[in-house]
Image (cartoon, rainbow, N blue to C red):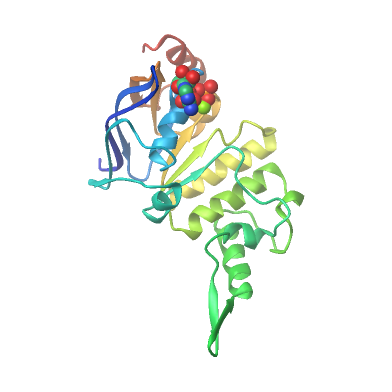
Amino acid sequence: MSAALSLRQIRKSYGAVEALKGIDLDVPQGKVMAICGDNGAGKSTLIRIVSGAQEPSGGELSLDGTKVVFASPHDALVQGIATIYQDLALAPRLSIWENIFMGAELVRRVGPFSVLDKRRMAQDARGYLQRLSVPIDDMERPVERMSGGQRQAVAIARALRWDARVVIMDEPTAALGVKETALVLNLVRKLRDEGRTVILISHNMADVVALADRVAILKSGMKVIERDVAGLDADALAHMVMTGRE
Ligand SMILES: Nc1ncnc2c1ncn2[C@@H]1O[C@H](COP(=O)(O)OP(=O)(O)OP(=O)(O)O)[C@@H](O)[C@H]1O
Ligand SMILES: [Mg+2]
C-alpha cells in the first residue's frame, strides 16, 4: 500500500503548549482517511501544517515519497494538496464559475491582449460539477443562492480545477441537514472513485464509518490509534475516541 502523504515526527508548539507531539502518519493513496479526536486533540493544527497554512516546529512531510516543504496554502495547492475549510472560503455574491477559478482564471489571447475566457471557465465549471453528480446549468448563479451541500460541491470543484491529488476536508457535514449530508458524503466518494486521496476531519462517527477506509485518532497531540475502519460501528469508534484505546 503506497502512501500519498507521509508525516514523520510532526511537532507543533504554541509557546508552552505542545499541540502536536511527534505525529507519524501514512495516508494511503486513493483512500479516505479520517482523523478523529476530542476537542483540542490537535486535528486542526495537523491540517494547518499539511495544508501549508503553518510551519511545523519539527518533523517532515512527504508527497509520494518525496520530501516537501510548503511555504503557503497556495504552494501546497500547486503541489497537489487542496484544503476545504469549514467556512469553504467562497465569495457568496460571486458566480459559481468565478468561485471555482478565483485567483487562477483562464485567459485567452485576442491579438496582443489576454482577456478572461469566461465561456471556457463556465464550461469547465459545469463539467466539474457534473463529474461530482451535481448537475447545475446556470454557472452565473451566485453561490449565496445554493444549498450547503451544493456549496461544498463548488469548493470541491475548485480542488478539481487544481487537479489536487490530496483533498482535505475539515468537518464537511457539521452544519448540514440529513439530505445535504448525504450529498456531501457522495461528493467524497466521487473524489475517491477518481483515485484521489481524501483526508476527512470529523466528529461525526456515522460519517466516518460510512466513508472512511482508515482512521487515525489523536489525543492530546499524539496519535493513539490508527486502523482500518472495516468492522467498526459508530459506537465502537466513539468509544475509542473517548478512551484512546481499542
Ligand atoms: N494559535 C494557537 N495558539 C495557541 N494555542 C493553540 C493555537 N491553536 C491551537 N492551540 C492549542 O493547541 C491544541 C490543539 O488545538 P487544535 O485546534 O488543533 O485541536 P482540534 O483537535 O482541532 O480541536 P477541535 O475539535 O475543538 O477543533 C489545543 O490545546 C489548543 O488550545
Ligand atoms: Mg479543530
Q: Position of residue 44 (x, y in %)?
A: 47, 30
Q: Residue at x 51, y 31 (%)?
A: 210
Q: Pick out the residue farthest to the right.
A: 145
Q: Position of residue 182 (x, y in %)?
A: 62, 38
Q: Residue at x 54, y 58 (%)?
A: 131
Nearer to me, 233 or 154: 154
Please determine whether, in this image, residue 53 is positioned above or below residue 223.
below
The C terminus lies in which quarter of the figure? top left
Q: Residue at x 60, y 49 (%)?
A: 153
Nearer to me, 205 or 78: 78
Residue 192 is left or right of residue 177, and the answer is left
Please determine whether, in this image, residue 175 is positioned above or below residue 246.
below
Nearer to me, 105 or 15: 15
Q: Pick out the residue farthest to the top.
A: 243
- Asked if residue 163 can be seen in this view, the reply is yes
Q: Name which quarter of the figure residue 28 lies in.
A: top left
Q: Name which quarter of the figure residue 124 lies in.
A: bottom right
Q: Pick out the residue farthest to the front.
A: 15
Q: Position of residue 218 (x, y in %)?
A: 40, 21
Please determine whether, in this image, residue 153 is positioned above or below residue 96.
above
Q: Position of residue 138 (x, y in %)?
A: 72, 64
The N terminus lies in which quarter of the figure? top left
- Asked if residue 195 can be seen in this view, the reply is no
Disc tally is 0
